[in-house]
């Protein structure tokens, strides 16, 4: 029985089977506008699901404490969904809080409403954070209400937090009591100080903050007309027009892009696209204006084209060292809501989104004819391929098709009746898999027996099908005793969050997780130690708080036994001995009590002189014993700094994979997975058919996407292997079936790099500056010189190649770097 949040009356907690029956169906319900949802810690919810799914009623779920999400009673900034928190409906939260919550949960404003946002793509979303809006008033310094006579203009500002669904007109009306005077006004907006002001017309004033691209922060400028009829912003407007009129100069193409908040993926992708000279020239001239297709329902009515053209002119104008791609980001967010916020995304997906939308905006075909898809039906490949390409270009004709579109041959074979279907389809990106044996590198901290003061930090190669047992078997060189074993743990918020068993997969581990492995000596049992101190509170009993990472100590087994029995003095002696080297004062006093993994009271409780602590033989995380040591403050311990050790794994990492292995793997016949079945017209049912992809026609600009990210039900990971690819003379002829086979050689133009972990990390771009034939590295706003060799790295993710027959691409100084 526990105390509920609402009425503090005892409540009977149902078993986990009933909890699951109540919670899980409610989570599947669709969002409804104005409904209330609540936030709970992600890792707590994952642990509850794990216990509930196994019906482990003997295992106690840790308390639901949402304070970890808050700071000074406000939700912490920049928290990420499904990493820091999970959202649940209000009724689910009330039940979970009733069963497992702590009384302090009621102190936090944790309700979040469902709002309706979007214009082209309307969606419902839970508004976790409101938009911080700075409203700025601008009027003449000679105005009678001015507080600064003699100045040309006066600015007043105030800050408000508004919903993403609020319209600009309503926001201004709600705050008009703060205006210095009445009169004619014009309204402007921008997302950040790096962005230029955008004038909002009458239609825009009726748009929401979300539709205007103001998703977390923004500025609204309300200017008052001068007495002579002029406007304070006119001078800046003229400057903007001058900037847009800039032309390509010899200094162009070296402009960085401002990071608007986790938008490095976009900056990297845009730099790669802007380096393609035919595309840049198209938008630097006026042809694109004549070809805008305003009636294409698949386009953006020219909005993305206009934003992209403006950005390309700034990037190639030579006048700016960096510019903010705010307009392009805003339009991409309208096309696909995954780009509307400020979470990290995928540069390849962003590049594909931009190319697809630019194509639809600039499609020269106004009225698309209806055409049946061409199938072989026994005809020659050349005939079917030509018909398919003509069908494609009769509906699609643009600068994107001219430069980026190629053609696949797709062969599907039914495993039941043997029917074969051959079709030819256009493509814009060639996504190639990496070999199955590929690996990723995880940082591990190793704590050798009786030496917690000097942990070791290594980078270990993890193969995709490896288990924890496989990993442990490769760490023998770091053992201090022959028959010792490694205990693998994850530490989170200064507690042991997870103990990994031998059959688990390390692929589930993120590069951002703190994985610490403790050496367990033979004939010893592990004892988990927490380091805490007490914080006194006015109206509640003192609470304990962790001040350093926990650790494991080795406790010897009793004679002729696999268990360990300890008195208080024995426990204290083992702890003090283990902490030699990190304890500032060896005589510092502390008290001890047995706790659970979440530091809640457990077992014998406070360890007294007469207490006997029994540690059974360690078999799994279920019988691990935890002891909290409570000190007077957090300054009694010096946290050790791990010593970095170079391993052969890291030293040999550059051997890697050859790009030809990836291309060969792409062309191998594969069986379709469940959920991707093909409908066989002969069998009249869906079949897990065999599919064979081949390249029939290659474009002038070839985008090669290395599929480094893998997702399935078991694991999500990133393959960090080095993929070797040539910068000059990539020979695609072995993989080309159609016309032009034997002539398909490509040179590298740009690389989008991804460094770091899955779901985060950082993107940069290496780009060949074609006017000078020099390589540059673009790291958001920062641009630096690079070498051709530096473009080939284990971070390479998207490769942009140009056919060597293209006149605009600079010819190599020599052929020494050509690779067959």
Image (cartoon, grey):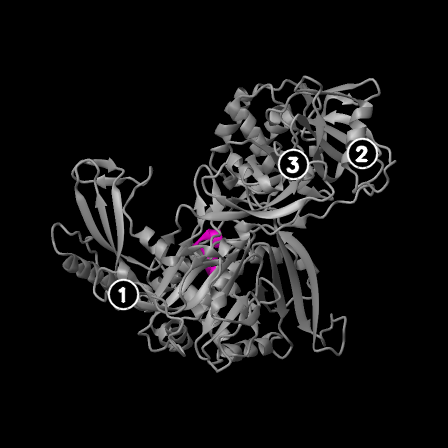
Are discs 2 and 1 less than 8 Å apart at CB? no
Query: In the orientation shown, which residue stands out farthest toward the left?
Result: 378
N-terminal of the pair, mark 3 or mark 1, is 1
| Residue 741, horizontal then vertical, whole percent | 23, 65
Q: Which residue is mark 1?
A: 365
Q: Quadrant of the N terminus?
A: top right
Q: From the viewer's perspective, tell me whether residue 526 is left or right of residue 54.
A: right
Q: Is residue 332 magenta?
A: yes
- Residue 481, image quadrant: top right
Circle 3 Cα neighbour tier, 10 Å, few/some/many (<14 / 14–19 / ≥20): many
N-terminal of the pair, mark 2 or mark 3, is 3
Q: Which residue is mark 2?
A: 576
In the rendered structure, which segment of residues is drawn in magenta? 331-340
Circle 2 Cα neighbour tier, 10 Å, few/some/many (<14 / 14–19 / ≥20): some
Q: Which residue is mark 3?
A: 518
| Residue 286, horizontal then vertical, whole percent | 38, 77
């Amino acid at each position: 029985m526990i105390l509920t949040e609402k009425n503090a009356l005892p409540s009977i907690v149902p078993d986990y089977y009933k909890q699951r029956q109540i919670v899980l169906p409610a989570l599947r319900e669709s969002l409804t506008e104005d409904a209330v949802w609540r936030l709970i810690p992600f890792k707590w919810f994952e642990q509850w699901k794990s216990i509930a799914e196994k019906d482990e009623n003997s295992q106690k779920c840790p308390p639901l404490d949402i304070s970890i999400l808050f700071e000074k009673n406000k939700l912490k900034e920049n928290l990420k969904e499904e990493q820091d928190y999970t959202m649940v409906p209000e009724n689910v939260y009330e039940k979970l809080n009733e069963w497992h919550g702590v009384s302090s949960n009621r102190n936090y404003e944790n309700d979040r409403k469902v709002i309706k946002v979007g214009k082209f793509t309307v969606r419902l979303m839970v508004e976790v954070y409101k938009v911080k809006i700075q409203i700025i008033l601008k009027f003449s310094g000679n105005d009678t209400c001015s507080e600064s006579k003699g100045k040309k203009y006066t600015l007043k500002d105030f800050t408000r937090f508004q919903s993403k669904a609020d319209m600009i007109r309503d926001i201004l009306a709600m705050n008009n009591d703060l205006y210095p005077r009445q009169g004619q006004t014009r309204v402007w907006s921008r997302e950040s100080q790096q962005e230029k002001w955008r004038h909002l017309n009458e239609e825009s004033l009726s748009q929401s903050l979300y539709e205007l691209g103001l998703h977390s922060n923004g500025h609204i400028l309300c200017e008052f007309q001068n007495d002579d009829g002029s406007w304070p912003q006119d001078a800046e407007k003229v400057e903007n027009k001058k900037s847009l009129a800039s032309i390509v100069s010899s200094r162009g193409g070296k402009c960085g892009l401002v990071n608007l908040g986790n938008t490095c993926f976009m900056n990297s992708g845009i730099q790669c696209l802007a380096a393609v000279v035919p595309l840049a020239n198209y938008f630097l001239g006026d042809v694109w204006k004549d070809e805008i297709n305003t009636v294409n329902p698949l386009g953006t009515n020219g909005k993305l084209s206009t934003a992209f053209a403006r950005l390309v002119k700034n990037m190639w104008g030579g006048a700016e060292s960096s510019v903010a791609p705010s307009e392009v980001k805003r339009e991409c967010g309208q096309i696909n809501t995954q780009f509307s916020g400020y979470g990290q995304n995928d540069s390849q997906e962003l590049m594909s989104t931009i190319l697809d939308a630019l194509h639809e905006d600039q499609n020269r075909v106004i009225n698309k004819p209806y055409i049946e898809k061409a199938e072989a039906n026994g005809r020659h490949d050349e005939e079917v391929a030509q018909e398919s390409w003509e069908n494609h270009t009769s509906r699609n004709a643009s600068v994107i098709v001219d430069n980026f579109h190629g053609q696949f041959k797709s062969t599907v074979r039914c495993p039941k009746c043997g029917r074969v279907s051959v079709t030819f389809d256009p493509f814009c990106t060639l996504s190639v898999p990496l070999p199955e044996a590929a690996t990723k590198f995880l940082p591990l901290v190793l704590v050798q027996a009786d030496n917690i003061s000097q942990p070791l930090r290594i980078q270990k190669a993890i193969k995709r099908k490896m288990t924890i047992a496989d990993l442990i078997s490769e760490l023998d060189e770091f053992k201090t005793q022959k028959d010792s074993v490694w205990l693998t743990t994850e530490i989170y918020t200064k507690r042991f969050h997870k103990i990994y068993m031998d059959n688990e997969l390390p692929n589930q581990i993120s590069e951002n997780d703190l994985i610490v492995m403790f050496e367990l000596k033979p004939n010893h049992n592990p004892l988990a130690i927490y380091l805490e101190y007490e914080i006194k509170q006015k109206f509640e009993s003192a609470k304990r708080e962790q001040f350093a990472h926990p650790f494991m100590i080795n406790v010897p087994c009793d004679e002729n036994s696999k268990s360990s029995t300890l008195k208080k003095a024995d426990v204290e002696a083992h702890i003090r001995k283990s902490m030699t080297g990190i304890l500032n004062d060896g005589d510092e006093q502390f008290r001890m009590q047995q706790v659970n993994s979440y530091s809640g009271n457990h077992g014998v409780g406070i360890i007294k002189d007469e207490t006997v602590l029994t540690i059974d033989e360690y078999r799994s995380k279920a019988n691990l014993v935890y002891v909290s040591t409570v000190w007077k403050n957090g300054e009694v311990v010096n946290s050790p700094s791990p010593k970095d050790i170079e391993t052969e794994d890291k030293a040999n990492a550059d051997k890697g994979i050859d790009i030809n292995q990836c291309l060969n793997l792409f062309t191998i016949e594969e069986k379709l997975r469940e959920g991707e079945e093909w409908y066989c017209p002969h069998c009249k049912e869906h079949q897990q058919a065999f599919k064979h992809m081949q390249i029939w026609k290659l474009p002038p600009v070839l985008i090669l996407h290395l599929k480094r990210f893998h997702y399935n039900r078991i694991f999500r990971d990133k393959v960090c292997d080095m993929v070797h690819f040539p910068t000059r003379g990539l020979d695609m002829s072995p993989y080309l079936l159609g016309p032009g086979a034997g002539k398909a050689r490509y040179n590298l133009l740009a690389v989008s790099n991804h460094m770091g972990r899955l779901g985060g990390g950082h993107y940069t771009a290496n780009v060949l500056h074609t006017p000078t034939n020099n390589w540059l590295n673009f790291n958001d706003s920062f641009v630096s010189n690079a070498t051709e060799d530096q473009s080939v790295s284990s971070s390479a993710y998207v490769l942009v190649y140009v056919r060597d027959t293209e006149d605009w691409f600079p010819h190599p100084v020599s052929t020494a770097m050509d690779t067959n």
